[in-house]
Amino acid sequence: MSESLPEETLLLVDPDLDFLDWATKHLAAKGLRILRCDDAGKAIKVIEKTPVNVVVSAVLLQPFDGLDLLSRIRTQSPDTLVILTTGFPTTGQIIEATQKGAHDVLRKESLSFELRPVVESALQTVEDRRGAVEPLPEMPSGDGRVKIIGVSRALQDVFKLVGRVARSDAPVLISGESGTGKELVAKAVHEYSPRRQQEMITINCGAIPENLLESELFGHEKGSFTGAIAKRSGRFEQADGGTLFLDEIGDMPLSIQVKLLRVLQDGTFSRVGSNDTIKTDVRIVAATHKNLAAEVSAGRFREDLFYRLNVVELRIPPLRERPEDIPLLAEYFLQRITRKNGMARIRISAEATASLASHHWPGNVRELENTIARACALASSQILLPADIPLSSAPGKTSALAHGLDQIINSAPSDAPLVEWITKQVAGRLLDRSGGDFKEASILLGVEQMELKRILSSKTV
Ligand SMILES: Nc1ncnc2c1ncn2[C@@H]1O[C@H](COP(=O)(O)OP(=O)(O)OP(=O)(O)O)[C@@H](O)[C@H]1O
């Protein structure tokens, strides 16, 4: 801890006395007074009597939990920074805690290396803020909202950002590969915003032909184009007061990008076939699997629109960059699928979990979800083994296989029928592998022994 810091007070709140002992020693520093409590009621009493700069509190507490304690501290002592610690934080806990003004939310598991730097940065914030304190807003909480699973630092940072931006009306741009959970995060932004009583309307800009997309978004007047047999409102009108989720925004044609820019600039638009201006109050959340900055450079996406949309960027890393999320997600999908189908409980073996964690997951979480669903449908016992979870080849293996096939194809004599030639090579390899055992080699190749002999002795190839 920096010696130049003035006298500060840190309060540790945790029912685990061993933890309190450890943290007191771990955080001890010159100029830092450390107080400790084992329940939330005592913590409030301490804060009533003593100015406390930073609180490090567990979420699981008596007689009320750490989130309640956080709310009370925010009201009673708005300058105090609160760091919450919890075993497996849920999405809701992290978003709610951030909205309620938590300085940070840490996993108990990572405290040995995260607690000290986070406390130091909180104390630095206390020092920087001295004389200029801005109280953080209180956010309403609620249940039954979207469930996003993830313990990786990267995903927890996404949750925290959602907590920070949900309350504002700022446009949000969510980027990430296909299947990483962009739509789920968009739902979270909506559900944790004051607009959640209204709808979130979704439109996939890549799935609708250009000539229809404009009318889908802005509506049309009767007779404005062939097929416009009646006046129709568009998604902007339907989403008034709520959120409009523009999925695959990178596929939006330039002609429509101009109109979207106008809505973002002054909140107005016109229906197709009308000059009347309609005002709308919509929060825009957009998502893309493309690199929009590169699309701007290539002239396919308007730069001005990019900057308007990209006020807050939420980047969701691919699953392979956060393997620590895989076991938890797999377990979550397993429970969801078995419960939904009224199946008995199925567990995943440690070996199968390890093979899931080392897979490349080009289709990200969606691929993992489908893999688990398939494994559940085909499971022969209550424990999934690696053999029950067939994984497509990782790119490395695919390219090695492709390379091997290329070699075989290239070495084929130009006058030989290719299929027969390849079959003969494979049959020869299988006979080698089975130590010259025709019976075994024919089983491996899936033909009768006579047929194997015919293939091997074929003179045409
Ligand atoms: N962290 C997560 N926790 C739980 N479920 C998740 C998570 N991430 C993704 N999923 C699930 O994976 C599937 C794909 O997610 P989603 O549709 O949000 O991805 P996406 O990035 O919008 O994909 P695309 O770009 O292809 O539209 C959904 O069924 C979603 O519920």
Image: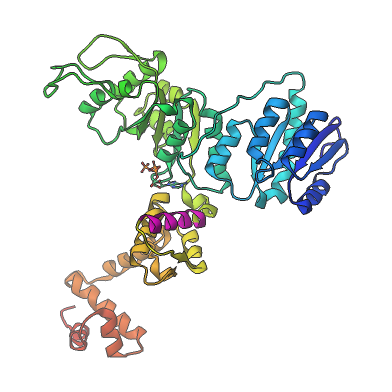
Q: Main secondary structure of the magenta part?
A: helix
* Range drawn in magenta: 327-340
The vertical placement of 439 against 134, above or below, is: below
Residue occupying image coordinates x 69% and y 42%: 63
For the residue pair 411 and 243, the one nearer the viewer reads as 243
The vertical placement of 134 against 93, above or below, is: above
Q: Tell me where residue 408 sits by quadrant.
A: bottom left
Residue occupying image coordinates x 51% and y 35%: 142
Expressed as whole percent of the image width and height from the top left, the position of residue 325 reads 52, 52
In the displayed structure, does residue 340 sit left or right of residue 221?
right
- The quarter of the picture where the C terminus appears is bottom left
- The quarter of the picture where the N terminus appears is top right
Residue occupying image coordinates x 52% and y 54%: 323
In the rendered structure, does residue 368 fall within the stretch colored magenta?
no
In the displayed structure, does residue 196 sit left or right of residue 156?
left
Q: Residue furthest front?
A: 63
**Can residue 51 be seen from the camera position used here?**
no
Expressed as whole percent of the image width and height from the top left, the position of residue 226 reads 11, 22
In the rendered structure, does residue 339 fall within the stretch colored magenta?
yes
The vertical placement of 376 against 51, above or below, is: below
Q: Tell me where residue 58 sits by quadrant.
A: top right
